[in-house]
Amino acid sequence: MTLNHFLNRVAARNPHQPEFLQAVSELAASVWPVYESRDDLVRNQILDLIVEPERQVIFRVTWVDDEGEVQVNRGCRIQYNSALGPYKGGMRFHPSVNQANLKTLGFEQIFKNSLTGLAMGSGTGGADFDPKGRSDGEVMRFCKSLMMELYRHIGANIDVPARDLGVGEREIGYMFGAYNRIKNDYTGAFTGRSVGLGGSPLRAEAAGYGCVYFVEEMLKTIGESLEGKTVALSGYGNVAQYAIEKINQLGGMVVTVSDSTGFVHDPAGISGEKWQYLLELKGKRYGQISDYAKLFEAAYHPGQKPWAVPCQVAIPCATLHELDEADARALVKNGCRCIGEGANMAATPAAVEMFRNSPVLFAPGKAAGAGAVAVSGFEMSQTSQRLSWEAEEVDRKLKNTMRSIHEQCMEHGKNGGRIDYVKGANVAGFLRVANAMVSRGLL
Ligand code: GLU
């Protein structure tokens, strides 16, 4: 079999899922030489097994809004791979959610979770529900209704959902509460809970901090650090907020934030009360990033993305495929040295190719963005022990995990004198799961 045969087979079985096919193509292209050289992997058809989710559940979610109108949404949970541990990954609430894009995220999550070195399989899920502009009561009723179905598929040793886009501490609290009540069982069926509900210190900060720790490691390989660097960043939600905080602590300066309407350019840097304001803004029902620009007299660029702003480091923290080939070209042309994805698959495949063929260091989200799920893994350990670790301990473990992922990328991503982080992350993530799958025998 050739790589093309394999990809044609996957394409035939998964029509109308271009993003999924792209994710599979990238992974398969990276691991193909290793795969072919391992008779045990080929004999067990591990690549064919790994692209097929173990289970997918799709269900109706019915609830009543504040006006008394009945609303119908669609919920989904994809239990992708359990070779390394219980299915593990976020729940995403966004109007764009569908089975195909959740499958793409779930596929990526296999390798991200594997890279953390923790005992976590891969799962992902969500609903086409838009929490934006909804009251607390509406969000609560939606979450409780969703759990009427989801509860039967999850559990501390089965599948442990967590935060993702549109799902934060509030939503996790409502879903976890419903789970406890329906199952009469107070165990760690969710991570990303508030500390008051048994969550881990630093879980909120984990994605942002982890990404910045990874970027520091990347910069170290070229004898540099974040100190004094100008950083362009997108988004202003959970990942962005704590990435900004950590960059400021390490002496860098973030000059952009964005939302779906446009981006703000603040050359004086986003820190102190401006950073505090971002946290408040996210909590507002109708807040927009242009409000920041008005308040702090910064430039607001409607309908644009921040990637043409000159910077040495770029951290996309907003959403899937937000950074395209033209954006990549602008970053390379302006002398950007290092890019770490805080959001899953933020760069399009063409943008990734451009980075890989340039002197820029580029790390994919499955490596640079693994901090969130790593601290979720720590939360699972704390829950099992019924103990809570100090924030300093979680931070130390998070830093070690990001360092270890970076080392794995260096080991498997050597490309002449350079490090190909895409290849390194794919090969290292793949090998750990593939070996576990072989050991378990065909299932
Ligand atoms: N959705 C986040 C991620 O992409 C977090 C998953 C988790 O904490 O389980 O890794």
Image (spheres, rainbow, N blue to C red):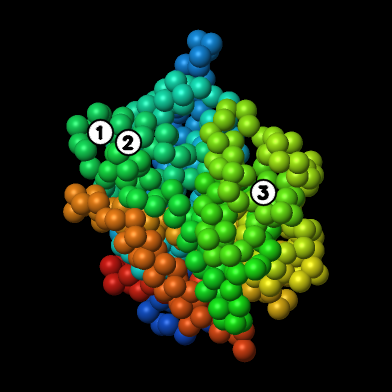
Q: Residue at x 31, y 30 (%)?
A: 178
Q: Crowding at label 3, few (<14), some or many (≥20) Cα neighbours within 10 Å?
A: many
Q: Nearer the viewer, residue 49 or 126?
A: 126
- Separation of marks 1 and 2 at Cα, in angstroms: 6 Å
Camera-nearest label, 1 or 3: 3
Q: Label 3 belongs to which residue?
A: 257
Depth check: 81 or 168 in front?
Answer: 168
Residue 237 seen anywhere in this rendered image of the structure: yes
Q: Residue at x 34, y 55 (%)?
A: 391
Reply above or below: 143 against 31.
Answer: above
Considering the numbered disc 3 on the image, is that residue within a helix, a strand or a loop? strand
The three-letter code of the residue at mark 3 reads Val
Relative to 38, does residue 14 appear above or below in the rendering? above
Classify 343 as above or below 259. below
Which residue type carries mark 2? Answer: Phe
Q: Earlier in the sequence, mark 1 or mark 3?
A: 1
The amino acid type, in three-letter code, at marker 1 is: Asn
Q: Residues within 10 Å of mark 1 (few under 14, many from 20)?
A: some
Report x, y in % for residue 403: 44, 73
Residue 41 position in % (x across, y down): 41, 76
Write down the residue under mark 2: 176
* x and y percentages locating residue 102 in the rendered image: 52, 47
Furthest residue to the top? 68
For the N terminus, give its image quadrant: bottom right
Please tell me which of labels 3 and 2 falls first in the chain.
Answer: 2
The residue singled out by tag 1 in the image is 180
State if disc 2 and disc 1 touch (CB < 8 Å): yes
CA distance separating discs 1 and 3:
38 Å
